[in-house]
């Protein structure tokens, strides 16, 4: 990927032979996702990965830079329509890294796609997003049709659960992932429950899980609710293994639940462990932010670099950039990218990992089993 971004002329001619000083320069891409609120760290991880790609690109192309525009959704689907409209009205914005969450993506993607804005999400995993008919939609990671079965088979084959209690937060992401898990586990699921966004008291749920005799709890949702649940569950004697998806895979979960309470939690994610990444990304990210890469930082770096490589090659209209991404094949730091006609990654490029909380850290455990 780096080879696509350095060494060439700062502004390549496009198919219409536009000049270096013309419309090839002054382009923008946007980050669209949560930067404030209870799940902010998930979006900050993505924004910072995209920003690193922009900073490196602009350093190498000082005479023809690309600007990163930030659109903070607070993770709220109710804000997605207005933000999407603000993106399409800015003619300089050719593509979006995001939207970050599936709920906001469901609302925003049709608006963005109708006006030709290239969508390249690094984190929204609901499979249905690829079936909405949004012609500019692309996903830089596996969806929950791979993560859900992977999590379920980990529960079945590695945890060897006999009784699993499934919880979801009714969001597009959380319910969708939980439904995938329930479909694979079948009769192993003894009971299920739904929690509310921003819920803080989980006493009745804790009692319900304990009474069910479940040896495993699967959580479909985000860390904002999972952290206080986990603390209350352990503090009240809950012993079941806790398994959750990528929406919980952040250090904020460990901090919110407490290191002791979070110990042993299993978190699945269609994202690559930092030690498996190619190149110097992890060191570069830490130098830029003061932190190790978070969940989907690397996937966002790849997504932004795909958009930037298209712009550098002269695809400086939304239509041309979308055609470029549709036909893109290349190796990033996380995987080899090739998009199917519905915008999803070629299945051969998808891997789901199970991570485990040990000693207050989230570390890679193993690749999740495949169906």
Image (cartoon, rainbow, N blue to C red):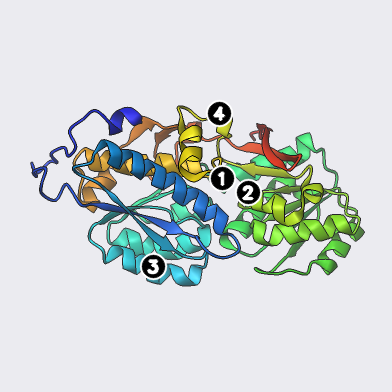
Rendered-image quadrant of the C terminus: top right
| Residue 343 at least partly seen | no
Whole-angstrom CA distance, mark 1 to mark 4, is 13 Å
- Which class describes the residues within 10 Å of circle 3: few (<14), some (14-19), or many (20+)? some
Question: Is tag 4's residue or tag 3's residue first in the polypeptide sequence?
Answer: 3
Badge 1 is on which residue? 295
Badge 2 is on which residue? 250
Q: Are marks 2 and 3 in contact (CB under 8 Å)?
A: no
- The image's mark for residue 83 is 3
The image position of residue 370, as x and y in percent, is 64, 34
- Could you tell me which residue is drawn at 34 percent across and 38 percent down? 56
Q: Is residue 319 left or right of residue 365?
A: left
Q: Are marks 1 and 2 in contact (CB under 8 Å)?
A: yes
Question: Is tag 1's residue or tag 4's residue first in the polypeptide sequence?
Answer: 4
Q: Is residue 264 left or right of residue 119?
A: right
Q: Is residue 88 above or below residue 309?
A: below
Q: Are marks 4 and 3 in contact (CB under 8 Å)?
A: no
- Which class describes the residues within 10 Å of circle 1: few (<14), some (14-19), or many (20+)? many
Quadrant location of residue 357? top right
Question: Is tag 1's residue or tag 2's residue first in the polypeptide sequence?
Answer: 2
Badge 4 is on which residue? 276
- Viewer-nearest residue: 326 or 55: 55
Q: Secondary structure at mark 4?
A: helix
């Amino acid at each position: 990927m780096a080879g696509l971004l350095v060494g060439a002329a700062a502004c390549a001619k496009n198919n219409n032979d536009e000049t270096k000083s013309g419309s090839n320069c002054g382009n923008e891409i946007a980050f669209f996702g949560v930067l404030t609120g209870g799940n902010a760290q998930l979006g900050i991880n993505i924004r910072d990965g995209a920003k690193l790609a922009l900073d490196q690109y602009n350093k190498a192309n000082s005479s023809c830079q690309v600007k990163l525009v930030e659109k903070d959704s607070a993770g709220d689907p109710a804000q997605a329509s207005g933000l999407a409209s603000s993106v399409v009205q800015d003619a300089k914005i050719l593509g979006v890294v995001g939207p970050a969450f599936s709920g906001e993506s469901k609302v925003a993607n049709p608006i963005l796609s109708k006006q030709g804005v290239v969508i390249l999400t690094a984190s929204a995993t609901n499979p249905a997003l690829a079936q909405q008919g949004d012609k500019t939609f692309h996903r830089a990671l596996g969806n929950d049709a791979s993560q859900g079965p992977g999590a379920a088979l980990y529960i079945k084959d590695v945890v060897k659960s006999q009784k699993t209690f499934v919880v979801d937060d009714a969001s597009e992401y959380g319910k969708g992932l939980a439904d995938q898990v329930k479909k694979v586990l079948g009769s192993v699921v003894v009971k299920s429950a739904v929690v509310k966004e921003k819920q803080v008291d989980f006493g009745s749920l804790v009692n319900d899980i304990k009474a069910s005799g479940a040896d495993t709890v699967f959580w479909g949702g985000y860390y904002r609710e999972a952290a206080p649940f986990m603390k209350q569950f352990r503090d009240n004697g809950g012993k079941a293994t806790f398994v959750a998806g990528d929406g919980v895979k952040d250090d904020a979960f460990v901090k919110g639940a407490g290191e002791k309470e979070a110990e042993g939690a299993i978190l699945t994610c269609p994202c690559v462990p930092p030690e498996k990444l190619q190149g110097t990304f992890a060191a570069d990210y830490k130098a830029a932010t003061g932190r190790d890469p978070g969940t989907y930082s690397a996937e966002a770096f790849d997504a932004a670099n795909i958009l930037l490589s298209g712009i550098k090659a002269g695809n400086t209209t939304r239509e041309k950039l979308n055609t470029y991404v549709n036909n893109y094949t290349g190796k990033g730091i996380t995987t080899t990218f090739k998009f199917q006609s519905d915008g999803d990654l070629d299945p051969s490029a998808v891997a789901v990992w199970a991570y485990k909380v040990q000693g207050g850290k989230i570390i890679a455990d193993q690749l999740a089993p495949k169906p």
